[in-house]
Image: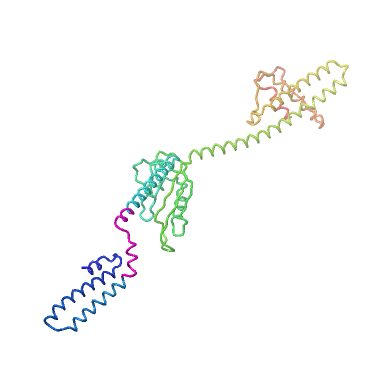
Amino acid sequence: MLITFVRRRRDVPFSHLFWLFGAFILGCGFTHFMEVVVTYHPVYWFSGLVKLFTAVVSLATVVALIPIVPRALALRSPEQLEWEVAGRTVELAEANAALREGEERLRLAVESADIGTWDYNPVTGALRWSDRCKRMFGLPPDAEVTYPVFLDRIHFEDRDRIDKRVQGAIGPKGDGSINVEYRACWPDGTVRWVVARGQAFFEGEGAERRAVRFIGTVVDLTDRKRLEDELWKRAKQLVEADQRKTEFLAMLAHELRNPLAPIRNALQVIRLAKDDPDLVEQSRQMCERQVRHMVRLVDDLLDVSRITRGKVGLRRERIDLGAAVHSAVETARPAIEGFGHQMTVSLPERPVHVYADLTRLAQVFSNLL
């Protein structure tokens, strides 16, 4: 029975002792049996062999017990084993509780950050998306998701690029990581920007290396992309506004120089023609007109908001077109005479009235001259 038990339970410690005890019991049984036999048949030599066998087995058992006794004494009792099992059960329960708490914290963090999760098995093709991940792609929570469905939800301009990145990450020579931005298209045509980050897990080496799991997260970037576009447009507008301001200031510098020449000429006329009141009055009126023109230009220069927008204010009123022509001629006359040119102005006998800005119209005519 002992031998049969040991043969079936190979995990029993000190199994060789069971063999020795089995042989010893068997030897003792044969010894007693031979004592009965020799009563009727004097085969003492065979009885002696059986006793010798029993003695040898007994000595072997004693020798085997010497190193085993300390080890056997160190074995824990059933009560100790029960206490150890109970302690490990408590530790396991605490570990499971900590694991559940960690999973709950991770779930709350994922939900608070509005992060979608995905889990892809490249071997079986199984793909699992969280409800948040499905919502980012415009899918209902009960939708069945496969890799072709995922590709179909990607904008056609990004589809090939993302497919190549995924296949490269999970390929035999891939590093397993992915971090890409792309556009997701909803069934109703809505386009959302998302960023996907993931890590693949491999088994095997060399040519046998293959990805067995690919997990990651998805975050909606639509609001951030919209803000980036708005910031880019605003920056572009600021650059354009600065350029318009530079152009506007250059124009004003040119316009401010134009009235100075007729004012200088008028002052010379006033100084030289003191005895001609009519000529002095005419020169004075010319100075007043040019000064008003310069005041208008300075007002434009001080209006920074209009400069940055590239808009010039117009003060429309009913004016005589001839007055604008005369103002332009007054401004341009010093330059015309300086080059030795002659200019003839021909105006209709009756006034021509228009609804315009006298100063701006005079600027246009002056620049043309």
1 and 258: which is toward the camera: 1
In the drawing, does residue 97 fall left or right of residue 298?
left
Q: Position of residue 10 (x, y in %)?
A: 28, 66
Q: Name the image quarter holding the N terminus.
A: bottom left
Q: Position of residue 366 (x, y in %)?
A: 73, 28
Query: Is residue 141 something one can see in this rendering?
Result: yes
Position of residue 341 relative to residue 5, above or below, is above
Q: In which quadrant of the rendered view does residue 46 lie? A: bottom left
Q: Is residue 68 magenta?
A: yes
What colour scheme was applied to this rendering of the protein?
A: rainbow
Q: In which quadrant of the rendered view does residue 124 lie? A: bottom left
105 and 37: which is toward the camera: 37
In the drawing, does residue 7 fall left or right of residue 35?
right
The magenta-colored residue range is 65-84
In the drawing, does residue 233 fall left or right of residue 179?
right
Q: Main secondary structure of the magenta part?
A: helix
Residue occupying the point 65% across, 19% down: 317
Position of residue 242 relative to residue 319, above or below, is below
Q: Is residue 368 magenta?
A: no
Q: In which quadrant of the rendered view does residue 245 lie? A: top right
Residue occupying the point 67% across, 27% down: 303
Position of residue 191 relative to residue 316, above or below, is below
Q: Position of residue 52 (x, y in %)?
A: 24, 79
Q: Position of residue 105 (x, y in %)?
A: 42, 43
